[in-house]
């Protein structure tokens, strides 16, 4: 007999008993996804370039029965991705929040740096998802990440907006081709407090959160837990594919200043 969850279009009991790989799980949204999934009974593997960060995620989940596994992986390294995919266990959910960002005025944007960002934030998920296809179980899903800049441009963010738009386009194409076995969606967050901004001086970072938050209908920036909860809901919903899902405190509908 179908459970209430199954009737609601969710895959079984959500992530319980399923295997989830969080690429980018050493910090920010990826870490929150990993911890929430582990807490909900999933077997979780976190991957990223820095072992200490991955171990910190695993340590925070110590109370959980099934420990979180860690894999050091640079998604821009084709050989490493191929080796990882070969050895990887069967997976139900692939969540790729790993990325890098560059900022700067378009007129002065260093093209090598912008291309490096595309190698990471676009070609990284592309490469990893393609390599892991044989390991993804039917009924599972792939969840990618873009961001509000794809459709709400920001000054000094032309390249970052473009890479977000590219990830969204990729999501649509993958979803079309990979169904019905696999679903593919993209989460598009607005500004979220995360380690992504750790390199900024603390006072500037606080001012950025404050001013961005005040510009939004909800009056604040988001938390990684809010984004992670939506990510898992999207990853598990059996009737959702090819979608870019905004979670941004109202950024897409906010009032823009004119000049
Ligand atoms: N935070 C925001 O305000 C915001 C807003 C809009 C969109 N987003 C998007 O949401 C996603 C998650 O953001 P976040 O805030 O969680 O960022 P984050 O805290 O900086 O996490 C990104 C993770 O990716 C890993 N990573 C970077 N390059 C990698 C590579 N080549 N191979 C493997 N792992 C790599 C990093 O760890 P290592 O350096 O150790 O590898 C890091 O743990 C990103 O796509 C971001 O663009 C975030």
Image (spheres, rainbow, N blue to C red):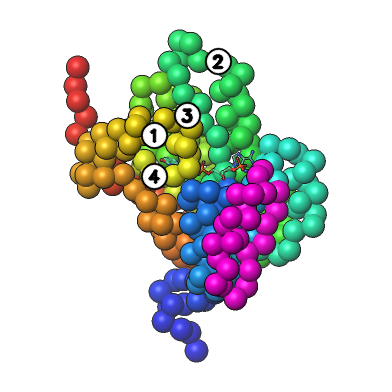
In the image, residue 190 above or below residue 71: above
Task: Please tell me whether mark 2 sits on a helix, a strand or a loop.
Answer: loop
> Label 3, label 1: how many angstroms apart (C-alpha)?
23 Å
Looking at marks 4 and 3 on the same chain, the residue that comes earlier in the sequence is marked by: 3
Looking at marks 3 and 1 on the same chain, the residue that comes earlier in the sequence is marked by: 3
Instruction: Determine crowd level at label 4: few under 14, some 14-19, many 20+ residues with C-alpha closer than 10 A.
Output: some
Q: Are marks 4 and 3 in contact (CB under 8 Å)?
A: no
In the picture, residue 154 is in which quadrant? top left
In the picture, residue 233 is in which quadrant? bottom left
In the image, residue 139 above or below residue 53: below
Residue 110, which numbered label? 2
> Label 1, label 4: how many angstroms apart (C-alpha)?
12 Å
Beta carbon of the mark 3 residue lies under 8 A of ligand 1: yes
Q: Which residue is mark 4?
A: 193
- In magenta segment, residue 51: yes
Instruction: Determine crowd level at label 1: few under 14, some 14-19, many 20+ residues with C-alpha closer than 10 A.
Output: few
Q: Residue at x 36, y 41 (%)?
A: 191
Instruction: Determine crowd level at label 2: few under 14, some 14-19, many 20+ residues with C-alpha closer than 10 A.
Output: few
Q: Where is residue 192? Give x, y as percent.
A: 38, 44
Q: Which residue is mark 3?
A: 160
Beta carbon of the mark 4 residue lies under 8 A of ligand 1: yes
From the viewer's perspective, is the residue at label 1 or at label 2 nearer? 1
Asked if residue 252 lies left or right of residue 197, the reply is left
From the viewer's perspective, is the residue at label 3 or at label 1 nearer? 1
Q: Where is residue 166? Give x, y as percent.
A: 52, 34
Looking at marks 3 and 2 on the same chain, the residue that comes earlier in the sequence is marked by: 2
Residue 202, which numbered label? 1
> Label 4, label 3: how many angstroms apart (C-alpha)?
18 Å
Q: Which residues are magenta?
A: 49-72
Q: Residue at x 43, y 15 (%)?
A: 105
Q: Is residue 94 visible?
A: no
């Amino acid at each position: 007999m179908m459970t209430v969850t199954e009737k609601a279009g969710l895959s079984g009991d959500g992530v319980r008993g399923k295997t989830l790989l969080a690429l980018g799980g050493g910090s920010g949204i990826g870490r929150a996804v990993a911890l929430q999934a582990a807490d909900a009974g999933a077997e979780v593997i976190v991957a990223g370039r820095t072992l200490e960060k991955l171990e910190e995620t695993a340590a925070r989940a110590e109370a959980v029965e099934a420990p979180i596994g860690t894999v050091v992986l640079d998604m821009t390294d084709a050989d490493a991705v191929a080796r990882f995919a070969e050895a990887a266990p069967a997976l139900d959910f692939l969540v790729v929040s790993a990325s890098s960002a560059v900022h700067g005025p378009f007129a002065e944007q260093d093209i090598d740096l912008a291309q490096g960002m595309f190698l990471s934030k676009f070609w990284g998920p592309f490469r990893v998802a393609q390599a892991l296809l044989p390991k993804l179980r039917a009924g599972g899903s792939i969840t990618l990440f873009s961001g509000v800049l794809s459709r709400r441009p920001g000054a000094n963010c032309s390249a970052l907006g473009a890479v977000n738009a590219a990830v969204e386009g990729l999501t649509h194409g993958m979803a079309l081709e990979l169904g019905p076995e696999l679903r593919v969606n993209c989460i598009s967050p607005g500004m979220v407090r995360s380690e992504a901004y750790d390199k900024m001086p603390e006072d500037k970072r606080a001012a950025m959160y404050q001013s961005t938050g005040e510009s939004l209908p909800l009056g604040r920036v988001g938390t990684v837990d809010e984004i992670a909860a939506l990510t898992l809901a999207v990853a598990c919903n059996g009737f959702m594919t090819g979608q870019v899902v905004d979670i941004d405190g109202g950024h897409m509908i906010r009032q823009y200043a004119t000049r």
